[in-house]
Amino acid sequence: MSDFMFSPGLLSASEDISGKPRDTLYNGSVDSQQWPTCYVYAERGCTGERKPLDDMDIDNDYLKRIGFNDRISSISVAAGRRLTVFTEPNFQGKSQVLDPDPRGLSWRNYDLSVDFNDTISSIRIEKVAQPR
């Protein structure tokens, strides 16, 4: 068992990809489940309804299923991940790249610009090297 402990409030329990709650902390240590690679939010400032996304390409059908097609206003990106958001299904239309924190901190928050606010229909998630 790891001695690594999270600071209270730094990370919280989240939902799995289906939206069902999952416990990711047990007695202060992380279990084998992976943390989401990003959260999408319905409001600016990473507030309002949120959904976790894991490492995969997210297309229009999935965003519709979770109720977030053309509803994303802000995004939190985990360290080591780069997101490209698209205004059209199938990774088409205008795109914007959301890079992780350049200092390698755990999360970087983005408010989407006017051109992308409530217009995202697909998302590509990539792993990237973290700074040392």
Image (spheres, rainbow, N blue to C red):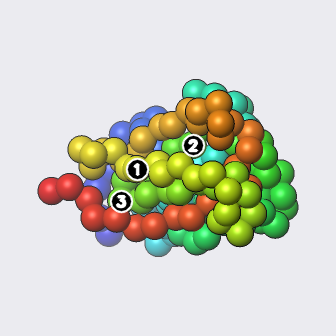
Image position, residue 40 (x, y; %):
64, 46
Residue placed farthest to the left in the image? 132
Q: Quadrant of the C terminus?
A: bottom left
- What residue did someone put label 2 on? 75
Where residue 28 sits in the image (x, y, percent)? 40, 52
The residue lying furthest to the top in this view is: 45
Of circles 1 and 2, the one toward us is 1
> Marks 2 and 3, Cα distance to the nearest angstrom?
15 Å
Q: Which amino acid does label 1 sit on?
A: Asp
Residue found 42% across the figure and 41% down from its top: 108
Give whichever of 103, 92 is nearer the camera.
92
Q: Residue at x 52, y 44 (%)?
A: 76
Q: Earlier in the sequence, mark 1 or mark 2?
A: 2
Q: Which residue in the protein does label 3 denote? A: 80
The answer to whether 58 appears left or right of 66 in the picture is: left
Percent position of residue 78, x then y? 43, 52
Q: Residues within 10 Å of mark 2 (few under 14, many from 20)?
A: many
